Amino acid sequence: MQILEGINWAILAPIVIIQLILMVVAIFDLVRIEKTDGPKWVWALVILFINLLGPIMYFIFGRRSY
């Protein structure tokens, strides 16, 4: 696979790790929290399928302010 040989993993690895940490923390928070702004299943899809920005969007817009 020539495509994988040209990738600079030293630059890409921290971004992937940050993405995974954000995704796991956001999903745990979504399960734990009682109410969100919008349906929980929509936020789960946003967190899982919108890379890097999905979890950030959840923490900014999805968590309900009391």
Image (cartoon, helix red, strand yellow):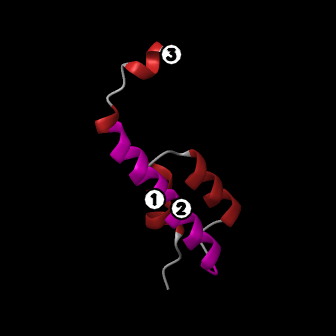
Q: Given the image, on which type of amino acid does mark 2 rest? A: Val
Q: What element carries label 3?
A: loop
Q: Mark 2 points at which residue?
A: 24
Identify the disc placed on residue 1: 3
Dots 2 and 3: beta carbons under 8 Å?
Answer: no
In this picture, residue 56 sits left or right of residue 8: right
Query: Can see residue 42?
Result: yes
Mark toward the start of the polypeptide (1 vs 3) = 3
Q: What element carries label 2?
A: helix
Q: Name the residue under label 1.
A: 21
Going 39% across and 53% down the picture, which residue do you hit? Answer: 18
Give the dominant element type of the magenta stretch: helix, strand or loop. Answer: helix
Q: Given the image, on which type of amino acid does mark 3 rest? A: Met
Establish if 6 lies above or below 36: above
Residue stretch in magenta: 12-35
Name the spot of residue 2 as percent of width and height, x first.
45, 13
Going 29% across and 37% down the picture, which residue do you hit? Answer: 11
Name the spot of residue 37 as percent of width and height, x first.
58, 70
Q: Which residue lies furthest to the top in this view?
A: 2
Q: Which of marks 1 and 3 is in front?
A: 3
Q: Which residue lies furthest to the bottom in this view?
A: 66
Establish if 13 lies above or below 23: above
Establish if 52 lies above or below 9: below
Going 52% across and 72% down the picture, which residue do you hit? Answer: 63
In this picture, residue 14 sits left or right of residue 47: left
Decide which of 10, 28 is in the foreground and name it: 10
Query: Can see residue 39?
Result: no
Decide which of 5, 32 is in the foreground and name it: 5
Q: Given the image, on which type of amino acid does mark 1 rest? A: Ile
Mark toward the start of the polypeptide (2 vs 3) = 3
Dots 2 and 1: beta carbons under 8 Å?
Answer: yes
Q: Report crowding for label 3: few under 14, some 14 to 19, many 20 or more residues within 10 A (C-alpha).
A: few
